[in-house]
Image (cartoon, rainbow, N blue to C red):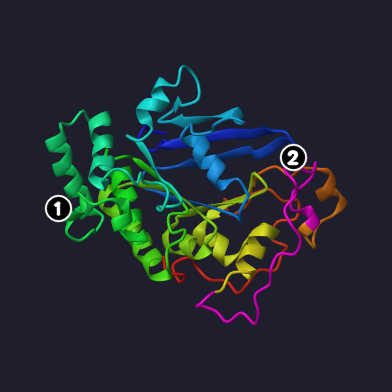
Amino acid sequence: MTDADAPLLQVKHLFVKFFTRRGTVHAVRDVSFDIARGETLGLVGESGSGKSVTAQALMGLIDLPGRITGGDVRWHGQSLLEGDGSLLRRVRGQEIAMVFQDPMTSLNPLFTVGTQIGEVLRRHRKMTRAAARTRVIELLDLVGLSNPGQRVDQYPHELSGGMRQRVLIAMALACEPQLLIADEPTTALDVTIQAQILELIADLQQRLGLAVLMITHDLGVVAGLCDRVAVMYSGKIVELATADDLFHRPAHPYSAGLLRSTPRLDVVIPRLVSIEGSPPDLVSPPVGCAFAERCHLATEECRESMPGLHFQDDGRKVACWRPFEAEGPAPVTAGEGGR
C-alpha cells in the first residue's frame, strides 16, 4: 500500500468509559474503522449508541469523568493518543475539524462571528487581524452566506439557525482540514434548511477534496451523502458496509430494523415497524450480543457469546451469529435514495 492509498484516519479497538457514581458506563466498546482520502463515512445509530462519544474521542475532547481506556487513533499512521498530546493539539482544528451538534450553543454570544472565526486563523495560521478578517469574509462567502462583508460583524443572535450552522462550517474549514467530522449537523433545523446544509457539505467535499465523518441517526442523510456506513449499537459497531450494500440488503438485524422503521419515498412500505424493547444498560452491558433481547432471531449462543466483527463474502463486516437472516424492506440502492 502506498502513502496515497493509506487511510487518513484509523481507529483501532477504541474503548471509552465514564466513571460515575452509579457505576462505570461502557460508552464505546472495541470500535474500529478507517476513513480514506475524499471518502464520506456515515456513523449511524439511535441516541445513546456511542456515536458522538466516538467523535469526541477522535478529537481528544473526552473530559472527566470520561476516559479513553483502550485502543488507538492514528492520523497518517501516527498515534494521536500516545505521547504528550502535542500531535493531537497540532492536528485538531487544523487538519481535523469538527462541526458540533447545536448551532444555537456552539457559538459565543458575546463575540461577532468574524471574531470567532478569525481567532481560529490567528491561532493556527498566525494571521494578522486584517488578513484574518479578509479570509473570514471569503469563508462566509464559500459557505453560501449572503452579504458576507456584513455578516462578519454580526453576533450569533442576529443570524438564523441555518446561518449559524453555515458559520460553524466556515469555522471548521478555516484552516483547510483534510477531515471534517460533522456531528448531527442538521439538529434543530427545519427540513428545508437541513437539505441546504447537507447539500453544502456535499458540495464543499467535492470542491475541496475533504474526507467526511457524518454522524447521524437519519438514514436519509446516509443515503444522500455516504460512501460507507458504520452502524453502531450499544457502544459497538455491528455492521460496516457500503451504503449501496446496506440499503440493498442489511446484514445485521439491527440494521434491518432501522431501515424498516424509516419512512421512504422510493418504495411503498405498508407500515413502519419500530424496534421493540430498549437498549441495554451500559453500566452492566450483556456478555453476549447487546441486541439479543430485542432480536427475534436470537439464540442462546447470541445471549451467551459476543459475536466479533467479521468479514462477509461481499466484503462488509458484521457482528452477528446469524447475518442476513432478518427481513428488511424492499431493496433500494443508495443512489435511488438521493445519493
* Residue 324 % position (x, y): 69, 60
Span colored in magenta:
264-293
- The answer to whether residue 153 is left or right of residue 156 is left
Q: Quadrant of the N terminus?
A: top left
- Tell me whether the residue at label 1 lies in contact with that at label 2, contact meaning CB atoms closer than 8 angstroms: no
- When the figure is inspected, residue 15 is found, relative to residue 214, above or below; the finding is above
Type of residue at label 2?
Val
* Residue 338 % position (x, y): 42, 69
- The answer to whether residue 208 is left or right of residue 288 is left
* Residue 175 % position (x, y): 27, 38
Q: CA distance from mark 1 to mark 2?
A: 51 Å
Q: Identify which residue is drawn at 13% across, 37% down.
A: 131
Instruction: Please identify, in this view, whether the residue under mark 1 or under mark 2 is nearer the observer.
Output: 1
Q: Identify which residue is drawn at 64% across, 70% down.
A: 260
- How crowded is the residue under tag 2: few (<14 C-alpha within 10 Å), some, or many (20+)? some
- How crowded is the residue under tag 1: few (<14 C-alpha within 10 Å), some, or many (20+)? some
User: Which quadrant of the figure has residue 190?
Assistant: bottom left
Q: 57 or 337, which lies in front?
A: 57
- The answer to whether residue 129 is left or right of residue 76 is left
Q: Identify which residue is drawn at 51% across, 62% down.
A: 244
Type of residue at label 1?
Gly
Is residue 205 something that shows in the picture? Answer: no
Is residue 312 something that shows in the picture? Answer: yes
> Was residue 288 drawn as part of the magenta stretch in this picture?
yes
The residue carrying mark 2 is 283
Element type where label 2 sits in the image? loop
Q: 132 or 267, which lies in front?
A: 132
* Residue 73 % position (x, y): 50, 31
- The answer to whether residue 126 is left or right of residue 320 is left
Q: Identify which residue is drawn at 46% across, 35% down.
A: 59
The residue carrying mark 1 is 149
